[in-house]
């Protein structure tokens, strides 16, 4: 059984939301990277610090209820709301704020934006 640890993720320069405290569990082990393919460096750092499993959500998928956190690169209206709507904590690499048709689901306890590597630290 994995020994998961928590991280605190703060908003970056010009960012919005958070901070988020993320700690994977046996039921929610995935650090889901949905940034155009491959594992984004933010997802890799979160996985390294927490013991979670970095997963490329562009090449395959996992059920929402197995995702500890989603790392996205949405500067617009789509992915920024999809994961919060499903109650999945979300980290956006872009300094965006709630927008689009799913904005009503985006809350500070589910989304943090503008995140850089220095904004991820052990909790």
Image (tube, helix red, strand yellow):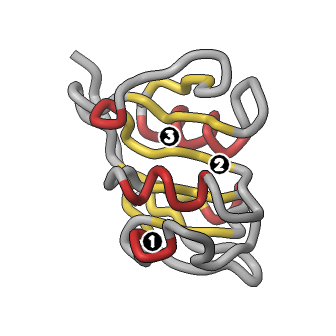
Q: Is 50 in front, or is 28?
A: 28
Q: Earlier in the sequence, mark 2 or mark 3?
A: 3
Q: Which of marks 3 and 1 is nearer the N terminus?
A: 3
Question: The N terminus lies in which quarter of the figure?
Answer: top left
Residue 49: mark in rendering: 3
Q: Is 86 in front, or is 53?
A: 86
Disc 1 + disc 2, Cβ < 8 Å: no
The 10 Å Cα crowd at callout 1, few under 14, some 14 to 19, many 20 or more, is many
Q: Which residue is drawn at 47% across and 24% down?
A: 53
Q: Which of marks 2 and 3 is in front?
A: 2
Q: Is 52 in front, or is 60?
A: 60
Q: Which of marks 1 and 2 is in front?
A: 1
Q: Which residue is drawn at 32% across and 55% down?
A: 87
Question: The C terminus lies in which quarter of the figure?
Answer: bottom left
Q: Is mark 3 on a helix, strand or loop?
A: helix
Question: Compared with residue 20, is residue 16 higher up or lower down, i.e. above or below?
Answer: below
Mark 2 = which residue? 72
Mark 1 = which residue? 106
Distance in Å between CA atoms under marks 2 and 3: 18 Å
Q: What is the x, y in percent for residue 79?
A: 60, 52
Disc 2 + disc 3, Cβ < 8 Å: no
Q: Earlier in the sequence, mark 1 or mark 2?
A: 2
Q: What is the x, y in percent for residue 37?
A: 76, 26
Q: Is mark 2 on a helix, strand or loop?
A: strand
Q: What element carries label 1?
A: loop
The 10 Å Cα crowd at callout 2, few under 14, some 14 to 19, many 20 or more, is many
Question: Compared with residue 26, is residue 113 higher up or lower down, i.e. above or below?
Answer: below
Rendered image quadrant of residue 69 = top left
């Amino acid at each position: 059984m994995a020994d998961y640890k928590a991280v605190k993720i703060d908003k970056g320069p010009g960012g919005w939301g958070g901070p988020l405290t993320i700690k994977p569990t046996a039921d929610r082990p995935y650090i889901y990277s949905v940034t155009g393919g491959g594992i984004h460096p933010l997802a890799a750092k979160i996985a390294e610090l927490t013991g979670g499993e970095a997963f490329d959500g562009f090449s395959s998928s996992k059920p929402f209820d197995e995702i500890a956190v989603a790392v996205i690169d949405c500067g617009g209206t789509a992915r920024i709301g999809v994961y919060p709507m499903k109650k999945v904590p979300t980290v956006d690499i872009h300094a965006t704020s709630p927008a689009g048709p799913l904005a009503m689901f985006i809350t500070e306890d589910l989304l943090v934006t503008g995140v850089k590597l220095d904004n991820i630290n052990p909790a």
